[in-house]
Image (tube, grey):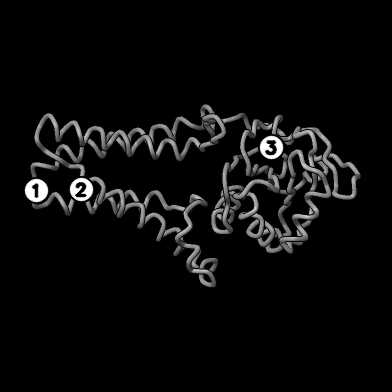
Amino acid sequence: MDVLTLGPLVLPTAVLLVVGGILLANLLAEWFRRRRGLDPGPILWKMLLAGFVAARAVFVLRHHDLFADHPWRALDFRDGGFDATAGLVVACVVGAELTRRAPALRRPLLVSSLAGIALWMGGAMLLPAFAPAHAPLPELSVRRLDGSELPLRSFQGKPLVVNLWATWCPPCRREMPALAAMQRKRPDLGFVFVNQRESAGTVQAFLTAQGLRMENVVTDPAGQLAARTGSVGFPTTLFYDARGVLRFRHVGELSEATLREKLAALER
């Protein structure tokens, strides 16, 4: 289970684990404040802020070439680009330094922090056990924009990125330039963009209006691919190996930097 649906909202489980860990840590901090008169909450929030900034900064530095021309994009963390290890290390260092002169807060801060980390990391380790099976590329047909049909498996034979999207979906629209750029940079990989439940005319009008030149843009008028792969929200990007076996998926917006990391993982 890599997403949780709450009415019209589709939330990645990984994000919910982070939020759950933060919530648990703060609930314990509040318990210590009320029951023991010790309030680690302010330090805990400083740790979280420092860790968040460090995790994003390390990710941006690792992909500095992609952010150099548009540095303000480093502030747009909707792509989920973070270095969790760097963030955790910095948060721990900040916590240790801030409690150096307040030893009474060390224990409640440690208990609160470890509980939150345990929920986050424990949940992350359990996620693969509940994730969708590594299924093969579905046997179904999609349509080119000229109306002709072809089997989806015709794209199989090399590592393949399958993007499920729609023109009415804002994050789909935002991530399209990054996907198009990566398609041009990586001709050794396969990219196919499967529009869900829209007409070829709607898709072509969108591509023209946005000035996007992309290969392998196809339509799936009945939404078969989303149903067959359990994709309940858009955009969803599926990563298949050269054998056509699903390795992992990403739910939500991708930037060129996060896409680069996903492709590196796919090729390992």
The quadrant of the rendering that contains the N terminus is top right
Q: Amino acid at mark 1?
A: Ala
**In the rendered image, which quarter is residue 113 located in?**
top left
Tell me whether the residue at label 1 lies in contact with that at label 3, contact meaning CB atoms closer than 8 angstroms: no
Q: Nearer the viewer, mark 1 or mark 3?
A: 1
Q: Position of residue 154 (x, y in %)?
A: 83, 43
Residue 102: assigned label: 1
Q: CA distance from mark 2 to mark 1?
A: 11 Å
Pick whichever of labels 2 and 3 is earlier in the sequence: 2
Q: Position of residue 204 (x, y in %)?
A: 80, 54
Pick whichever of labels 2 and 1 is earlier in the sequence: 2
Q: Which residue is mark 3?
A: 245
- Local packing at callout 2 (Cα closer than 10 Å; few below 14, some 14-19, many 20+) is some
Kindly state the secondary structure of the residue where label 1 is placed: loop
Q: Along the line of sight, which residue is nearer the eye, 176 or 85?
A: 176
Residue 43: assigned label: 2
Q: Amino acid at mark 3?
A: Val
Q: Nearer the viewer, mark 2 or mark 1?
A: 2
Q: Along the line of sight, which residue is nearer the eye, 245 or 63?
A: 63
Q: CA distance from mark 2 to mark 3?
A: 45 Å
Q: Position of residue 57 (x, y in %)?
A: 40, 60
Q: Could you tell me which residue is drawn at 12 percent across and 29 percent down?
A: 35
**In the rendered image, which quarter is residue 7 located in?**
top right
